[in-house]
Image: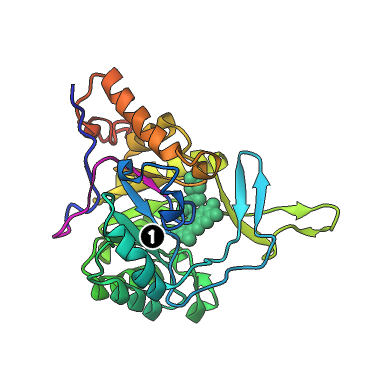
Amino acid sequence: MTVSTLVSLAPKHDGGLMLKNPVMTASGTFGYGTEYAKLVALERLGAIVCKGTTLRPREGNPQPRIAETASGMLNTIGLQNIGVTALVREKAPIWAKWDVPVIVNIAGETVDEYGKIAETLEGVPGVAGLEVNISCPNVAAGRIPFGVDCDAAAAVVTAVRDSSSLPIIVKLTPNVTHIVEIAEAVVAAGADAVSLINTLLGMAIDVRAKRPYLSTLTGGLSGPAIKPIALRMVYEVAKAIDAPVIGIGGICTAEDAIEFLMAGATAVQVGTASFVNPNAAIEIIGGIDSFLREQGMKDIGEIIGVAQMGRRT
Ligand SMILES: Cc1cc2nc3c(=O)[nH]c(=O)nc-3n(C[C@H](O)[C@H](O)[C@H](O)COP(=O)(O)O)c2cc1C
């Protein structure tokens, strides 16, 4: 029996963004894909999302910038990356030869910077779409992240939309009171899809040094510890908006991924799990396929959103 796992991440976009399966790798946990090429059959992935890319190269934050936690990790990498110009010159030509879409995750400190990065990526072979990270500090607003304010988040999306013809996924921060409002604002501003969640703000203390462990005091929590929170947010956002939702947060197994799909996600991203097992995403793809067969289903669409209470007809 053939099972279709094809999903569309940008159904309202002219060019669309079709994935052969709903499993992607999450930004910052899979480098530029090239680092994993010898370990992972990349062409089997639904898509790869590359490391957060800024207008200029960044060295990132000082050490220590990683701390292990119960069922997760804290990080404060600080967007270390090669910058968009080097990405276009060195990485995109490699991606253009791959049989897997690569989505570039972009990050700016001003609305204008987001627009300029998008402009630089316009028409570049090998770039299939943009994922806009709005968790970044907004310099003009006293470094309060764009993603915690509907107007600031929408302004970023408008700038990117005006500079790019690519499908646009907006990546939401969970460090907000009402994530649904932010999701609605970015979709109204032209996002083709939303992805959530980015990391949750957390902290660790070095008890011998009697000070916070991470160089920047706080960091982003990821891994299995955040899964129930992520799942709840995905459920709420998927119920509220008329655009595809990509579920992220602590996904380690096929069953985790299926939970997100049933909550209403059209696709999922695997992050921290790739650090433990580089083939985690590939194993999840196989596990979803087995589940669909076991359930006698022919299409991935049969599980998307089925756990949404009050939505089923
Ligand atoms: C070391 C590390 C670096 C990350 N870098 C980025 C980044 O550059 N841009 C971004 O949008 N998200 C970044 N993230 C967030 C992940 O893409 C993902 O949203 C988050 O880790 C939750 O998923 P997980 O629990 O599966 O890791 C990073 C996460 C980790 C652990």
Pinpoint residue 73: horizontal percent, then vertical percent.
61, 47
The quarter of the picture where the N terminus appears is top left
Identity of the residue furthest to the left in this view: 14
Relative depth, front residue between 67 and 161: 67
**With respect to residue 296, does 61 lie above or below?**
below
Identify which residue is drawn at 41% across, 55% down.
Answer: 34
Q: Which residues are magenta?
A: 13-25
Callout 1: 10 Å neighbours few (<14), some, many (20+)? many
Tag 1 secondary structure: helix
**With respect to residue 74, does 251 lie above or below?**
above
Q: Is residue 138 visible?
A: yes
Asked whether residue 23 is drawn in magenta, I would say: yes
Toward which corner of the image does residue 60 lie, by quadrant?
A: bottom right
**With respect to residue 166, does 17 lie above or below?**
above
Instruction: From the viewer's perspective, tell me whether residue 23 is left or right of residue 81.
Output: left
Identity of the residue furthest to the front in this view: 38
Relative depth, front residue between 208 and 98: 98
Hey, what amino acid is under mark 1? Answer: Ile
Asked whether residue 253 is drawn in magenta, I would say: no
Disc 1 target residue:
182
Identify which residue is drawn at 45% across, 38% down.
Answer: 279
